[in-house]
Amino acid sequence: MPSRYPEIDVTQVRLIPLASRQSKVRKDFLGRPVEADASLAAFWDSLPHILVADDLRAVAAAVVDSRRREKPVILMMGAHVIKVGLSPVIVDLMERGVITCLALNGAGIIHDVELSLFGVTSEDVAANLADGSFGMARETGEFINGTLAKGAKEGLGLGECLGRELVEKQAPNLEVSLLGQAYQMSVPVTVHVALGTDIVHQQPSADGAVIGELTLRDFRILARHITGLDDGGAVLNVGSAVVLPEVFLKALTVARNLGHSCRGFITANFDMIQHYRPRVNVVQRPTLEGGKGYAFTGHHEIMIPLLAAGIKLGLIR
């Protein structure tokens, strides 16, 4: 018994030659296997010319082009980037003149200071929360809060005064300190603190007025650096889902309000999950009137060394 429901008649559908069809993938786009002893350049060139692999090439190339044309490359970082061991990679990019400004959240300075002074960081929150000792390491709070008090009296920025203090105290692990190395290279580090979010705010040495004054000063330093983003430049946000995307959007607004074009640059967001604020405040909105935004999803400890490798290859080619 035939179906009670009628079918469409396909005998008259219009067919087209494959050669006239628009296709997204060609054979020459495909990736290539590499040998175990292949060079980094061979590995980079073996990546497919498709989707995110090509986006990564484009971001690396844009960063290289920006520096060759003396345009800013601003790296905004959440603290997780430090916790997964990437400080030496970032320091190397600063030494090569790639990163012209580094923006951190409040947690970033904690991990950087602890690694610089003591060689350890990232406490076991669950274990220490149970007895109320989480975040109560005396040395961390007294160093950071004490240094900020000195910086406020001298009119320094938050990142600047911490970097100077680490250098002057000859921190035992200064070679991996973003704050210390940046200070020695005269690379501005701006720190953007949300009061109450960081362990040093729990301690009696914390002074809200001092923290607010210095982090506001850093906001204005960042806004000044953003004024150079015109017909080139790059802003990379790695692992900050809320604070730094919000800070960037406001700082960009200030720069444009004061008459700086700030158009025609690229932005990129790197994170393990794509969140709303980085997507709209870093990737989309700032590039609406020129430029291009990119989004990459993956673990920082893999994606950032890969990006850094692509940038360094571009610098020598």
Image (tube, rainbow, N blue to C red):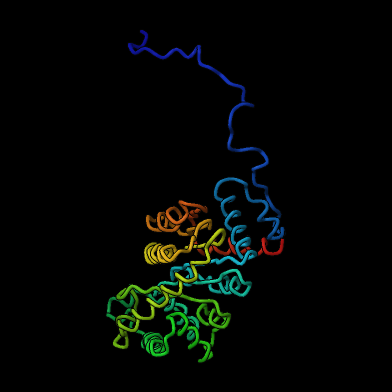
Q: Is residue 269 shown left or right of residue 63?
A: left
Q: Which quadrant is the C terminus positioned in? A: bottom right
Q: Is residue 221 above or below residue 153?
A: above
Q: Residue 294 placed where, x, y %?
A: 50, 53
Give the quarter of the image for residue 148.
Answer: bottom left
Q: Is residue 89 shown left or right of residue 36?
A: left
Q: Is residue 271 above or below residue 166?
A: above
Count of marks overlaid on the render: 0
Q: Residue 155 placed where, x, y %?
A: 42, 86
Q: Is residue 72 above or below residue 4?
A: below
Which residue in the rendered view is the most extreme toward the left?
A: 131
Do we see residue 85 in this rendering? yes
Q: Is residue 182 above or below residue 223?
A: below
Do we see residue 306 in this rendering? no
Give the quarter of the image for residue 185.
Answer: bottom right
Q: Residue at x 62, y 75 (%)?
A: 95
Q: Residue at x 45, y 79 (%)?
A: 159
* Relative depth, front residue between 251 and 99: 251
Q: Residue 200 placed where, x, y %?
A: 34, 81
